[in-house]
Amino acid sequence: MKKNIREVMQERLLILDGAMGTQIFNKNPTVDDYGGIQMEGCVELLNERRKEWIQDIHASYFNAGADAVETNTFGCNEIVLNEFNIAHRSYELNYLAAKLAREVADSYTQEKFVIGSIGPGTKLVTLFQVDYATMYQSYYSQMEGLIAGNVDALLIETCQDLNQIKIAVRAAKAALKKANKKLPIWVQVTIEATGSMLVGSDIQAALTTIEMLGVDVIGMNCAMGPEEMRAHVAYLGESSPMSVSVLPNAGLPINDNGRTVYPLGPVDFASKVAAMAKDFSLNIVGGCCGTTPEHIKELVAATKNIVITPKIARYERGVSSLYTAVPYNLEPKPLFVGERTNANGSKKFKDLLAENDFDGLVQIAKEQLKEGAHVLDVCVAYVSRNEIEDMAEFLKRLVTQVNIPLMIDSTESPVIEKALQIAPGKCIVNSINFEDGEAKARQILTMCKEYGASVVALTIDEEGMAKTTARKLEIATRIYNLAVGEFGLDPGDLIFDPLTFTLGSGDEEFRKSAIETLNAIKEIKQKYPKVQTILGLSNISFGLNPYTRQMLNSMMLYYAVKNGLDLAILNSSKIIPIAKIEEEDRKLFTDLIYDNRSENYDPLKSILAKFSHIKKQDASQNNKRATMSIEEKLKLDIIDGEKQKVVDDCLEALKTYAALEIINKILLEGMKVVGERFGAGEMQLPFVLESAETMKTAVRTLEPYLEKNADSIKGKMVIATVKGDVHDIGKNLVEIILSNNGFDVLNIGIKQPIEAIVEHYKESNADVIGLSGLLVKSTVIMKENLDYLKQHGFSVPVILGGAALTRDFVDIECSKTYGAPVFYAADAFEGLKIMELISEAKKNNEEIDAELIRSIMRKDKPDQAKSAEENKIKIVRKGEQTIKLDAQGQSSWVRKTEKVPKPPFYGSKIVEESL
Ligand code: THG
């Protein structure tokens, strides 16, 4: 009897296969192999048309010693197949691919496994390039096909977006449930050389979010070689409670005359991966781009003696936004939850909501962030408005524009579910209680499990809000048994809120409510040390004047933390450090909190007498913007994506500058900073898009003031993804950046043959052609396209962009082919710069000096721009491959980055007490 994959993984390191795509392209598929020109590049069709190729490749990996192979289904989902008009064939092609691999696996006497490969597709759900339901369905049919084809595990791989992962896992679980199977689900993220996933998530955010989804394996694949991955893998190895997989590329690719060369030969690759497997107790290793059966053979040999050891993970439980995770156990405590993004807690928020001013609401969120909130409590409940729609509208903006995690504050289950579908990271749901029995709590707990969220539980039951410590504890116990005992929630994801009443009314009934709450915090933590506690702090002081509220809230926070409070819902700008409160006042508020009254002393009366005359006065910080020049303000508006502020600032700047000057001298400066930060991995993609939007708003504001005869459109580009390539995320980004910076862009889509591109170029009278593509073979197509242009007598400037290109390939090889200006743009900002330089030359009626422009671009990017000799590139011979490395031993292709995100501080610290 053969063992199943989970059993084998208990015993040893599992070895996966290497690259599939490279092996396929080595067979040089023709149009006929794909079944027609429209299908060119759809490698999934080869499962049907060239079965023997695919089975050959699987067998070659098994023969090299791999325990498992991945099905040829990386792009086999409805969204990608739809680019070839065969979305309806998803199930069938996945089924076929799984069966092909299964046949090969079953022909061995040893255990050999089939892993269903599920790639990310070509659309980012977090950037709303596709909607939730479409992506879910796209994955669901793929999963169904793979499961029916009898795979041993589902591998959701090369993930670039946390919400994509959440959707794919949910679809996988649903499909498994329907098929009544319990296959392992594996998830692998792709961390770019910038240090984060494409949409900006760091490795902690990925772990925090994925840990909640109930999958078997978390791992990394693609984008980097073993060395570049090492720091991230170390983090996963030490912190992940799940098994860890690592499938690196064979180093960072170098484009050698249109051929991608991966620098790591089999032996080097194997020894580096084996070292990680040993150092970080990995459970699965294999290869991604550039790896071959030879690499896997060496990997099998290098890992032969590695023994699997039981994992002792130091996982730090917390919550996560799209970008980054925040541990619950913050030092110093507590974790601040911003209270002002709440229609019931802020008049300003409510008024803006009534006006549908969602950008204004985002502004409030950003202010909370600046004032020190670690998490935002979001509540849009407003009678007579549609709460689901409001939640969706607000969150769509919030999740990309504000980088802290969210607490979804609603009493309505459908609102909570909608929010959990939009938020990419791990949220907190606020809240459950037993006010009307358990049914609703169960419903919400089901959602928390399904979407991977923590939950706040209020100590309220059928008899109402618990007032005494004993009652609070009794309800907490009942909730614990349900959430942890029955629903299997990790106790660390259960956040108890023992609630408190105001001390401001002087009502005899509530005089002891702070004491009861403080004691409840202490006792809940004693009884259940792993759970979290939270308090809506401002409730303690309703009815008092603002200044008194600040003092009382601050003192209450101090005592609550002493009693074990982990999180506090508050307005962090209004919290006064205890040390700044006068000794005498501290005593007064302490007496109020602990109800230390005596015959002639009531602390509440003393407080009212002492502070009631104090008008609005608070601890809010000085406003830096106020002291800035208008130039600085405008620049900052662009960098921070301040769509709202930029309008007024533009109007003010018009008093001093001409509109065109504002755009060219000030705003573009801001955009330049954005470009630099993006290039250095310091600014995530959604923020870049936000800055571009702000640029557009500014230009629109200034448009009426531009001199009518001055050319406000600086130039025009026709842009396309080349033939056989469906990737357009980069191209679409270029469109946004260019069009928001004064250029006209005609984006004609993906898979464009050069004839169509030329057609549009002629019709539109564009100044430049932009060619884009992600695949290695697209670099060859680009060169062919340039040859076509030359043969047909064109000399229009062409800009090339795409992951597999290198500057040398474009500047030297492509330039020679074309004989007219052709430029390399590493990202959208380089494209913008080149467009600026070209339009400058046109305006001055000058010839385009390609060499000059190239030298400017190289100077801008000294790291990657120098020619081979200058950079002292060593030509190293390793095995069969000739590879080029720079002085640091890194390929000249890679964009250098200093910043690799570091894990947060996880140890214990001694924090000085201030009272
Ligand atoms: N526990 C949990 N969730 C909660 C609460 C809680 N959510 C809502 C609330 N309580 C916490 N949020 C607030 C937000 C604002 C105020 C109080 C609690 C507040 N606002 C001022 C007022 O109403 O006077 C400011 C008004 C304004 O700015 O317009 O006090 O306890 N789990």
Image (spheres, rainbow, N blue to C red):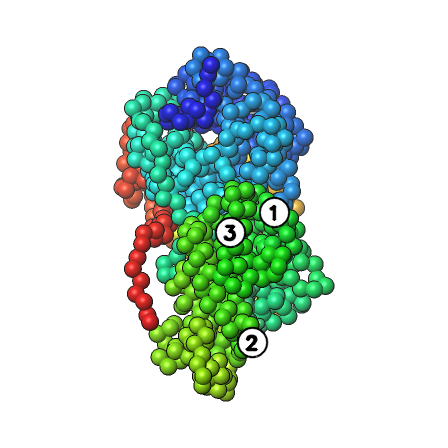
Q: Which mark is residue 256?
A: none
x and y percentages locating residue 154 in the rendered image: 52, 30
Question: Amino acid type of disc 3?
Answer: Thr
Give the residue drawn at x 65%, y 54%: 436
Q: Residues within 10 Å of mark 1 (few under 14, many from 20)?
A: some
Q: Nearer the viewer, mark 2 or mark 1?
A: 2
For mark 3, what is the residue? 477
Under 8 Å from ligand 1: the CB of mark 2?
no
Residue 539 visible within the image: no
The residue tagged with tag 3: helix, strand or loop? helix
For mark 1, what is the residue? 442
Q: Mark 2 or mark 1, which has the lower sequence index? A: 1
Front in this rendered view, residue 82 or 852: 82
Q: Residues within 10 Å of mark 2 (few under 14, many from 20)?
A: few
The residue tagged with tag 1: helix, strand or loop? helix
Question: Amino acid type of disc 1?
Answer: Arg
For mark 2, what is the residue? 507
x and y percentages locating residue 703 in the rendered image: 61, 67
Outermost residue on the front side: it is 599
